[in-house]
């Protein structure tokens, strides 16, 4: 019989950890949360100091009896849940539900699932931190109060089945406010003038220089307002001589970016890999909990992936420096290890950044053990971390000032002198990757004008949020925490408050109506700054500097007053879908445009009696797809002929036996045409 019981959250983690510990340990999974507030009622005694009434979740009712039995037989119970506030709360719930005595309950945490990290954690257990538990408990109760008190009001005033969330509602507001900015934006015209120039002798490469000044005063972006001003400049420059008036050469360095934390990993995975925040976290969870990599067996490949810290352990820095020097050479190694500090509001610096548990596990060398998604994300994390401990990239830059009468032009060029961290981590922004190439020039040198090119431009509205930029906005405004970014985005899409089109967020009419109500009647709930203040107060609770009941009371008293006023003053809203001239081919009624989180679509106004729908393009026009065509291809599952169908992503093959047989496959024009 094992002496010790170790409880973790997930079966995958259970499997990985069990192999690192000897026969003295029994490792079991709680399968996540075991207790929560009840779904059928608010579950908080507001008048009794906001006391929560927890119940066992359905899944836990089967697990708890076995865990109780094992915990009673064990001399020590190690609660090894995740290294964050939610993990601390799960550990506390386990201790309470299992009735583990104080002297037997041992809380351990670790940044990575490796043999060394686990044995070190077991040597240094601690008691459960009540401040971290209270902080997480306060967050859960706050969200429950908002959801269970505000949602019924929205049912009565807007639409049945709606729900409101303390943090999610602010995310929807950001999207709605951005849409309003775009709607009200008035573009301003402005012009630029570019000179295409060439040397008279030697290297005859044509290069460009932009107009930057007149009479020694620099032009601002919008100073040349229209064609009239542009034409006047061209007239002034007619027949002018062009001469190099100054050359400035510099060596410019660019430092690597820090290793990932949750938000930057999600942003980069979105930009570089096209992963949603939810997909990124799902894949990262697998990499953290353990992958079988051959002779090593199952091992965690990355450190804990829910973090807002940029700290890196001394051992990891030492290992990475040795790896860099051996593989890339001494010139790629800085004199000292690089240190990074998080700029995230309320960052928990005791945590670590996301990085490989060992840089020696080179992505390409373990690729065969990973799924394509796992490889892509691990490769991204590995490269970012190794690059973060490498030398700067070095550029030779040159700026050339050119005089033409009383006008000044400037041409800039840059060449990469030393790759440094760029050896393994390529930049994604064009501005940084491009390298203008100028001919060799000297001060006082005359230049030949090839042509003057005036260009008309218009200022552009701010772009709509994509997943990466929304996460960045949430982080910068102190809204939510690393573990909440992906659930926030998932929730606002599922509630049909926003839709995602071409990877950009658009608010739905429902999202705008709910946001307008909240802005008018629940100012604090929807206020970005107030939401950030709540996050700071939750941090203070975690630090033991604020009482959790006081934070709840200070929030709830004005919220309760807003609820009473809202009940009296909010008028019943009616959400009408946008009417169109399109006629339903089945019943003859008009069709309307409706929203879903997947995008807009045409639907019959006779719903639910008529359920006819059509896809529409970005201009609201119906997309007519051809009827299915019978092919000679046989379904390998049932033997029926396959049909050529056309969907949003183009043609595909589908079994004619649908819905009994749902087999589909890619359509290849060469094979199936």
Image (spheres, rainbow, N blue to C red):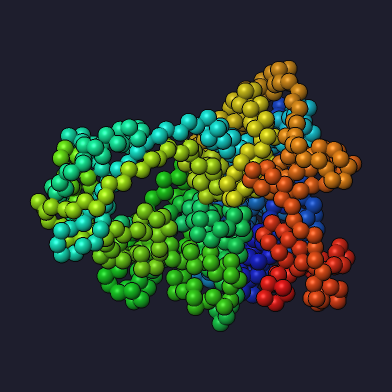
Residue 42 against residue 105 in the figure, above or below? above
Query: How many numbered marks are there?
Result: 0
* Res 30 seen here: no
Q: Which part of the image, by quadrant, shows the C terminus?
A: bottom right
Q: Is residue 270 visible?
A: yes
As drawn, the residue found furthest toward the bottom would be 295
Answer with the quarter of the image where residue 510 lies: top right
Q: Is 101 above or below relative to 218?
A: below
Q: What residue appears at the point 47 percent right and 48 percent down from the top-left corner?
A: 348
Residue drawn at the location 68% of the way across and 65% of the way down: 11
Please provide percent x and percent y for residue 90.
Answer: 65, 51
Which x, y percent locates residue 539? 51, 40
Q: Position of residue 43 (x, y in %)?
A: 75, 37
Q: Position of residue 290 (x, y in %)?
A: 59, 69
Nearer the observer, 395 or 309: 395
Instruction: Out of 226 and 376, give the one closest to the viewer.
Output: 226
Relative to residue 176, is residue 27 depicted above or below?
below
- Left or right of 365, for residue 153: right
Picture quadrant of residue 306:
bottom right
Residue at the left extreme of this rendering:
444
In this rendering, position of residue 419 left or right of residue 199: right
Left or right side of 350 for 412: left
Quarter occupied by the N terminus: bottom right
| Residue at the (32%, 43%) spot, across then down | 454
Up the image or down, 185 lies above or below 498; here it is above
| Residue at the (67%, 68%) spot, across then down | 26
């Amino acid at each position: 019989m094992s002496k010790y019981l170790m409880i973790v959250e997930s079966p995958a983690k259970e499997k990985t950890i069990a192999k690192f510990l000897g026969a003295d340990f029994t490792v079991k999974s709680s399968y996540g949360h075991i207790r929560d507030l009840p779904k059928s009622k608010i579950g908080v005694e507001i008048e009794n100091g906001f006391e929560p009434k927890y119940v066992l979740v359905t899944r836990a009712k089967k697990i708890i009896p076995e865990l109780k039995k094992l915990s009673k037989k064990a001399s020590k119970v190690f609660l090894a849940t995740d290294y964050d506030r939610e993990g601390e709360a799960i550990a506390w719930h386990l201790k309470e539900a299992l009735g583990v005595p104080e002297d037997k309950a041992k809380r351990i945490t670790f940044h990575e699932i490796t043999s060394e990290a686990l044995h070190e954690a077991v040597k240094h257990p601690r008691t459960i931190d009540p401040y971290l538990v209270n902080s997480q408990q306060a967050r859960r109760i706050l969200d429950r109060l908002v959801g269970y008190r505000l949602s019924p009001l929205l049912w009565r005033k807007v639409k049945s089945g709606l729900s409101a969330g303390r943090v999610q509602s602010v995310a929807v507001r950001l999207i709605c406010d951005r849409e309003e900015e775009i709607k009200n934006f008035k573009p301003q015209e402005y012009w630029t003038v570019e000179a295409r120039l060439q040397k008279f002798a030697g290297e005859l490469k044509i290069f460009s220089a932009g107009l930057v000044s007149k009479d020694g005063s620099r032009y601002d972006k919008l100073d040349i307002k229209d064609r009239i001003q542009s034409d006047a400049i061209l007239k002034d420059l007619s027949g002018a001589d062009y001469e190099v008036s100054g050359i400035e050469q510099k060596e410019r360095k660019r430092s690597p970016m820090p290793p990932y934390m949750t938000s930057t990993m999600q942003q980069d995975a979105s930009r570089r890999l096209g992963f949603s925040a939810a997909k990124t976290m799902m894949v990262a969870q697998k990499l953290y909990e353990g992958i079988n990599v051959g002779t090593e067996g199952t091992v965690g490949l990355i450190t804990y992936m829910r973090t807002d810290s940029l700290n890196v352990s001394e051992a990891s820095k030492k290992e990475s420096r040795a790896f860099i020097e051996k593989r890339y050479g001494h010139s790629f190694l800085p004199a000292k290890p690089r240190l990074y500090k998080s700029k995230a509001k309320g960052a928990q610096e005791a945590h670590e950044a996301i990085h490989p548990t060992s840089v020696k596990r080179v992505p390409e060398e373990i690729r065969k053990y990973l799924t394509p998604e796992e490889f892509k994300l691990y490769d991204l994390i590995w490269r970012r971390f190794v690059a973060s401990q490498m030398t700067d990239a070095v550029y030779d830059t040159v700026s050339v000032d050119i005089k033409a009468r009383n006008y000044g032009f400037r041409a800039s060029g840059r060449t990469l002198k030393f790759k440094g961290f760029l050896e393994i981590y390529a930049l994604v922004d064009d501005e940084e990757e491009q390298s203008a190439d100028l001919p060799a020039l000297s001060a006082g040198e005359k230049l030949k004008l090839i042509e003057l090119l005036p260009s008309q431009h218009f200022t552009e509205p701010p772009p709509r949020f994509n997943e990466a930029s929304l996460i960045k906005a949430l982080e910068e405004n102190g809204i939510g925490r690393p573990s909440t970014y992906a659930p926030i985005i998932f929730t606002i899409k599922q509630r049909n408050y926003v839709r995602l089109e071409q990877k950009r967020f658009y608010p739905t009419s429902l999202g705008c109506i709910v946001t307008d109500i909240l802005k008018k009647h629940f100012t604090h709930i929807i206020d970005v700054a107030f939401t950030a203040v709540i996050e700071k107060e939750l941090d203070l609770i975690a630090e033991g500097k604020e009482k959790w009941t006081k934070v709840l009371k200070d929030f709830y008293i004005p919220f309760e007053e807003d609820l009473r006023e809202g009940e009296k003053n909010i008028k019943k809203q009616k959400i009408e879908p946008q009417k169109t001239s399109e006629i339903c081919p089945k019943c003859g009624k008009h069709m309307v445009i409706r929203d879903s989180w997947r995008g807009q679509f045409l639907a019959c106004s006779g719903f639910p009696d008529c359920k006819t729908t059509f896809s529409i393009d970005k201009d609201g026009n119906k997309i007519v797809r051809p009827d299915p065509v019978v092919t000679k291809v046989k379904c390998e599952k049932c033997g029926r002929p396959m049909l050529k169908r056309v969907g949003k992503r183009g043609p595909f093959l589908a079994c004619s036996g649908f819905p009994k047989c749902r087999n589909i496959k890619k359509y290849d024009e060469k094979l199936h045409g």
